[in-house]
Image: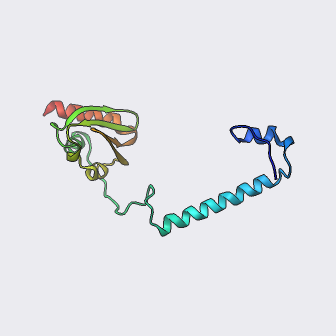
């Protein structure tokens, strides 16, 4: 079994360069077999070793149903309070907060408030809230200014 491919080994290479190959009919069969082997091996490893993949967390966290300024207040508290927040920003899916002391950030509470995940890098904390991140940033700004 041999196939002529270039750098990318993609579908276009496979089709264009199939004239340079022998037993090309084996490639889809081998591909399906490899796919089944990979799926089975990783499925068994994830189950046997209890690997944490998205959706397989140990405890189910009951999410808060807070809205508006109540939610903003809870978020400010979860980030360690007004004094701990040095910069507040948001992109499409993430609430980005620079903090003075990362140890004061309550990651479990952020997840309880609806964050899909929390990423800490240096003095920056990113809470993934999806498309409502920008609205949460605005509400937090208003809440902090009103304190």
**114 lies left or right of 30:** left
In the picture as drawn, the residue positioned furthest to the bottom comes out as 48
Determine the image quadrant of residue 77.
top left
Determine the image quadrant of residue 132.
top left
Asked if residue 20 can be seen in this view, the reply is yes
Q: Tell me which colouring the rendered structure shows.
A: rainbow
Q: Position of residue 108 (x, y in %)?
A: 28, 53
Q: Position of residue 56 (x, y in %)?
A: 43, 60
**94 lies left or right of 80:** right
Front position in the image: 112 or 35: 35
For residue 82, above or below residue 57: above
Q: Position of residue 107 (x, y in %)?
A: 28, 50
Asked if residue 65 can be seen in this view, the reply is no
For residue 91, above or below residue 65: above
At horizontal 76% and vertical 53% (from top left) the residue drawn is 28
For residue 140, above or below residue 40: above
**131 lies left or right of 68:** right
Q: Position of residue 135 (x, y in %)?
A: 32, 34
At horizontal 83% and vertical 42% (from top left) the residue drawn is 18
At horizontal 23% and vertical 31% (from top left) the residue drawn is 141
Give the total number of marks visible in the rendering. 0
Q: Which of the image's four quarters has the C terminus?
A: top left
């Amino acid at each position: 079994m041999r196939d002529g491919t270039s750098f990318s080994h993609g579908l276009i290479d496979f089709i264009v360069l199939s004239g340079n190959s022998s037993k090309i009919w084996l490639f889809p069969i081998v591909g399906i077999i490899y796919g089944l082997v990979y799926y089975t091996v990783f499925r068994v490893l994830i189950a046997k070793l209890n690997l944490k993949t998205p959706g397989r967390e140990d405890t189910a966290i009951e999410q808060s149903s807070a809205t508006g300024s109540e939610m903003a207040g809870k978020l400010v508290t979860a980030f360690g309070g007004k004094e701990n927040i040095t910069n507040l920003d948001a992109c499409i899916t993430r609430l980005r907060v620079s903090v003075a002391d990362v140890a004061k950030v309550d990651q479990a509470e952020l997840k309880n408030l609806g964050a899909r995940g929390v990423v800490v890098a240096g003095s920056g904390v990113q809470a993934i809230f999806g498309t409502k991140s920008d609205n949460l940033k605005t509400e937090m700004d208003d809440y902090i200014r009103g304190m």
